[in-house]
Image (cartoon, rainbow, N blue to C red):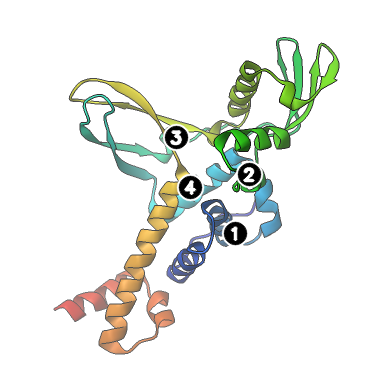
Amino acid sequence: MSIMQNLSSHTIVQLWETGQRQHPLERMLTLLASAMPGVPRSDLPNLSVGQRDAYLLMLRERSFGSQFAGFAECPQCQERLECQFTVADIWHPGRPQESPLHIQIEDYTVEVGLPTQADLLAIVGSRSVEVARAQLLKRCIREVLHNGEAIAATALPDEIVTAIGEQMLQLDPQAEVQLTLNCPACEHSWSVLFDITTFVWAEISSLARRLLREVHILATAYGWHEADILAMSAIRRQFYLELVAS
């Protein structure tokens, strides 16, 4: 993959505008395509989920820094608590295994490919979680042997399917990030899933709206064009905003 590039103010506003018409999964491809222009857009859907999230973490750190902060509610006492962590805390340095993979569980030998962004996009329109799960299973499992005899993926027992999913996560560890939280009020501990796709899009949206508000203020005050205002450095733009407010 090519070197990650900084996102300009103009690009952030453009990404936000384009993303309003896209499914959340497609937005992530748009973000990565903008940050890695040397990579053909057609290659990005082939990233495994863990690879995609690793690149999104790199993009987030480059654009907004390494610190994360959020809030969670204790499921036991409903205490609201702040949680803070860094990119390093949730970064898995190991690379995902190359597909296809061969997994041996009891009497079953299963050839699988790690779920990709394309696989997730293909099941977006599924009628239910059960249907989506079956479709994803069909896309990821290439071959199943039971005691050496080929069988259909749909014939796999549920416990074997669950075990396959667990092993696939171990082979693509960045695909699922769990945060362990501790409530200071009742000392309850629990885990929550951290979704970098949701987090980074919320930050992009917030920054884009802020930039457009700044454009509105400066365009109203000086008659400047949007492109010229967005092309300014953040320091220079803030100076003009302070002049307007004084």
- Which residue type carries mark 4? Thr
Q: Amino acid at mark 3?
A: Ile
Relative placement, left or right, of 179 versus 182 is: right
Mark 3 element type: helix
As displayed, is residue 47 above or below residue 97? below
Q: Looking at the image, which residue is at 66% across and 43% down? A: 119
Q: Residue furthest bottom?
A: 223
Nearer the camera: disc 2 or disc 1: 2
Looking at the rendered structure, the kind of residue marked 2 is Ile
**Pointers 2 and 4 in contact (CB under 8 A)?**
no
Categorize mark 4 by other alpha carbons within 10 Å: few (<14), some (14-19), many (20+).
Answer: some
Lower sequence index among marks 3 and 1: 1
Residue that badge 3 annotates: 90
Placement of the C terminus among the 4 image quadrants = bottom left
Name which residue lies at 71% across and 10% down.
106
In this view, the residue in front, 87 or 41, is: 41
Proximity of marks 4 and 3: CB atoms separated by less than 8 Å: no
Residue at label 4? 197
Q: Nearer the viewer, mark 2 or mark 3?
A: 2
3D distance between C-alphas at marks 4 and 1: 15 Å
Q: CA distance from mark 2 to mark 4?
A: 17 Å
Reading the image, the residue beneath label 2 is: 123
Picture layout, residue 144 above or below residue 55: above
Residue that numbered label 1 is attached to: 33
Which residue is situated farthest in the right direction here? 149
In screen coordinates, is 52 left or right of 20? right
Q: Earlier in the sequence, mark 2 or mark 1?
A: 1
Label annotation for residue 117: none
